[in-house]
Image (spheres, rainbow, N blue to C red):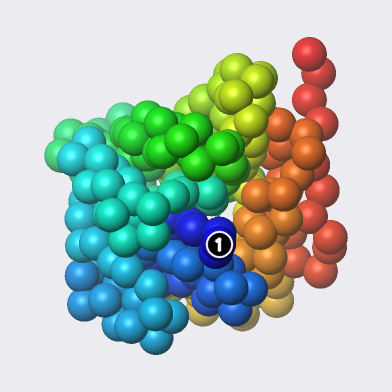
Amino acid sequence: MSTVALITGAASGIGAATARRLSAGGVRCVLVDLDGAGVERLAKELDGTWLAADVSREEASLEAVALAEQRFGRLDLVHLNAGISGRVDVTAFDVERYRQVMGVNVDGVVFGVRAAVPLLLRSGGGAIVVTSSLAGLVGYVGDPIYTMTKHAVVGLVRALAEPLAAQNIRISAVCPGFTDTPLVAEAREMFVNAGFPLLTAENVAAAVESAFYTDVPGTLLIVQPGRQPVPYRYAG
Ligand code: NAD
């Protein structure tokens, strides 16, 4: 019986690289993204299944999990990865944009966990990896609302680690530095000119795969260019 994974934000960047990596290892994938054409294309390439949906809506997660059950009969791995940057000036922000960033980066993860856990349990357990960020561990002055959302999901992972582990579900987070994906396209030239090394989406996908199989629930895996991923150690 094949392992089955659900990946959000799968049409591009880190999500697409994770889907390719897992598929290459024989995992069957359910790919979810707002970009319907992109996610359909990748699903065809990987012989997976796909859903065009907005993860900030609870129904998206419920539909995606139902699709996994209908198509593959089980669910083992969940990569809650869809995310958008904030570019929100906290002293004069656009409320719509603020709600959108919170909706995708925080609600999308909460709804994803909530929808996936029952099917993971029916499948005998499994693993959830959330894409946080280095900005989930330290303050990123360029984007305070984004930083807040990435801290929020780290808090969720830390609080859920033990109770989910007791049900044979491991939850962890990857915390990558700047990664060369469309998310950072605007700043890419600045990074390159400054000689600032960027991760590739494939670097992060490798860390996601290892996080799925960590035996330490609540692991926050720091991913930086040119180094092996290391678990973040915190007091308490
Ligand atoms: P990306 O823009 O290449 O991919 C993000 C994907 O999420 C896109 O396909 C987009 O269509 C999808 N998406 C956006 N809103 C959505 C929604 N409402 N519902 C469903 N899908 C939606 O960016 P990426 O860099 O691969 O980002 C993936 C994750 O990695 C994000 O959570 C991001 O915050 C995080 N991250 C990125 C970096 C970086 O430097 N690129 C660093 C740390 C963490």
Which residue in the rendered view is the most extreme toward the bottom?
A: 45
As drawn, 60 above or below 209: above
x then y, percent, for residue 74: 44, 50
Q: Is residue 161 left or right of residue 142?
A: right
- Residue at 38 percent across and 73 percent down: it is 48
As drawn, 223 above or below 196: above
Q: Is the CB atom of the residue marked by disc 1 within 8 angstroms of ligand 1's nearest atom?
A: no
Looking at the rendered structure, the kind of residue marked 1 is: Met
- Residue at 48 percent across and 57 percent down: it is 5
Which residue in the rendered view is the most extreme toward the top?
A: 236
Quarter location, residue 38: bottom left
Q: Nearer the viewer, residue 4 or 222?
A: 4
Quarter location, residue 27: bottom right
The N terminus: image quadrant: bottom right
Any part of residue 132 in sight: no
Which residue in the rendered view is the most extreme toward the left?
A: 96
The C terminus: image quadrant: top right
Please, what secondary structure does the residue beneath circle 1 have? loop
Q: Nearer the viewer, residue 43 or 66?
A: 66
As drawn, 137 above or below 42: above
Q: Nearer the viewer, residue 75 or 233?
A: 75
Quarter location, residue 11: bottom left
- Residue at 46 percent across and 49 percent down: it is 75
x then y, percent, for residue 170: 64, 35
x then y, percent, for residue 94: 19, 39
x then y, percent, for residue 62: 25, 41
Q: Which residue is mark 1?
A: 1
Q: Is residue 76 left or right of residue 40?
A: right
